[in-house]
Amino acid sequence: MGAAESTAQRVAQQPIIALLGNPNCGKTALFNRLTGARQKVANYAGVTIERKEGHFTSPEGRSFRVLDLPGAYSLSAHTPDEEITRDVVAGLREGERSPDLVVSVVDATNLRLNLRLVLEIKRLGLPMLVCLNMVDVAKKRGIVIDTARLSQELGIPVVETVAVQSGGEKALLQSLDAMWPLYESKPNALSAIDTVSVEETQREVRRILSVAASYGEDRGNLTEKIDHIVLHPLVGPVILAVLMFLVFQAVFTWAEIPKDWILAGIDMLGGVVKAHMADGALRSLLVDGILGGVGSVLVFLPQILILFFFILALEDCGYLPRAAFLLDRLMGGVGLSGRAFIPLLSSFACAIPGIMAARTIQNPRDRLVTIMIAPLMTCSARLPVYSLIIAAFIPEREVWGAMSLQGLVLFVLYFAGILSAMAVAYFMKRTMGAKRNQPLMLELPAYHWPHLNNLAIGLWERGKIFMTRVGTIILTLMVLLWALSSFPGAPEGATHPPIWYSFAGILGRGLEYIFAPIGFTWQICIALVPGLAAREVAVGALGTVYALSQTGDELATSLTPVIAQSWPMATALSLMAWYVFAPQCMSTLSVVRRETNSLRYPLLMAGYMFALAYTASFITYRVALALGA
């Protein structure tokens, strides 16, 4: 206890540095460069806005805590993210210690926009330092910045950084050591921000740039040349569609070998357990409950990491805002702004950050509609379900000589989610009395190669989140499901496997009356119940259920051939249609409740999505039966 208390006291005494800047200024890249993997992600108290904190040690041995605040264009907040940033900087956030130093990160290629925020922070009277980031890109564009003169005009220390390069943070670290200990200062009231008008602030920015920066011949700006192709009204959408299609092809084709490795490891571990343990409840728990359940989900980790790799790479290289621009007209046709694209794209990874990202949409009606359709985007939790069924029922062969048929089916499922979301958005906007769409204003960052350090940290975080879910939520539910599926056991002279007579079996057979019209078996019905906690849990539940349904001595970690022999094609297609729509994620509904501050909208979401799921599955099942599937 004493060691824990001393550690907590030591952390509490560490100086706090707040990184603050406009979106796309390289702030998060600098945060990653400073902290590496020494960071933790949580939420600010009472809201679902992400809080990133890390720590690092300076060359002279000083330890610092650093906060990566949400990106903001101004401290005159217009979005929930900007409100958090304003309150933390001004020391108004309950439970947050005021930062000892504000490091304002600015994009050296776009000082005209970035310096407005610097001048606003300066009016608060906080200890401050400016990081002139991306100076390498600025030089290529012919932008020459006199750092000493800029520091003189601002009255603030200014250092040059290149956050994406190893050692690009050295000047910042040296300046931090030189500035310490900081002078005692009492911050001004937040109202100090508004003592100068926006027009006067912009005039001051132009004056500073006139004496501290010069703009010569652009020697390396390929962004405009690339945008002539990427943003072309005909070629651009084709490039976007091809990119998305290649991503889904890669999710299947690249993941096969690591999936086989994981599956072989699970099989080997199960075989060792069976060889060294006598038959009984404990062996059944380990083999059928944990390995059969958790192992069935763990095998899809490579596909999830591949999906996140492409999303992170496209985001890091600057392409995603272009995709939002390209889709603005299409989304405007259903009553949405192109600004909704980023939240909806985030929902392909997980609906929760997608719903949270909708805070950047200022129009309340647009924001609400985006939140309501975000769960229809095919999140990574659906991927294990789709991959399982596709691998079991769709043959592994090439079509048109170049494409994987399995990858093509996965692309169709993702596309079905997009089409359904657009249809629901169109209906909601019309019924809510939508007004004329607001024009899209979006900053397009310069293109650059994705940085391996950022990709590695992003993939590590996503993989850690997935493994944490496997080791906590999924493991707990699989042990609970094993217990419900194993007891009270089969009576003497039983003609069915023991699970048939268990509590879970009784529940599954009861639910079968409701789901029989859409082709679901009692085993699927059992899996749907724990699957309400999270979609991927259904795969683990199926693994446990079918492991306990086997009468032989075969290990049930290879779930794919088991369901291929147990289900007709019509049932498989019906289940995929169900998962396109069904809101089987309690965490998502909980976040909707917090983001909308109302119980009405999560209930409405659950109701319309379950209705769509049942209707789509019913139609799919009946049509498949009619076609002889």
Image: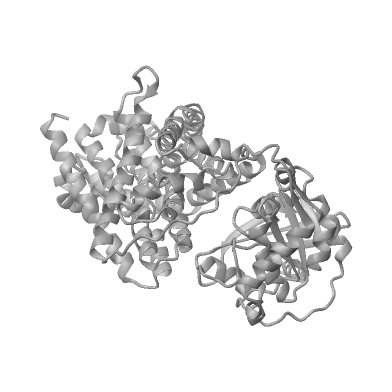
- What is the x, y in percent for residue 164? 70, 44
- What is the x, y in percent for residue 145? 78, 52
Instruction: Choose between 475 and 273: the one closer to the eye.
Output: 475
Q: Which residue appears at 56% of the width and 44% of the height? A: 318
Q: How is the image coloured?
A: one colour
User: Is the C terminus in the top left, top right, bottom left or bottom right quadrant?
Assistant: top left
> Quadrant of residue 286 in the image?
top left
Instruction: Choose between 194 and 384: the one closer to the eye.
Output: 194
- What is the x, y in percent for residue 226? 55, 36
Give the left or right position of residue 49, taking residue 125 as reference: left
User: Is the N terminus in the top left, top right, bottom left or bottom right quadrant?
Assistant: bottom right
In the depicted structure, whether residue 558 falls above or below residue 69: above
In the depicted structure, whether residue 282 falls above or below residue 41: above
Q: Which residue appears at 76% of the width and 56% of the height? A: 56
Give the left or right position of residue 326, taking residue 224 as reference: left
- What is the x, y in percent for residue 82? 56, 67
> Quadrant of residue 2 in the image?
bottom right
Give the left or right position of residue 353, taking residue 552 as reference: right
Instruction: Kindly give the residue lying farthest to the left in the view shown.
Output: 626
In the depicted structure, whether residue 576 falls above or below residue 610: above
> Can residue 506 be seen here?
no
> Can residue 350 be seen here?
yes
Number of numbered markers? 0
Instruction: Choose between 50 and 288: the one closer to the eye.
Output: 50
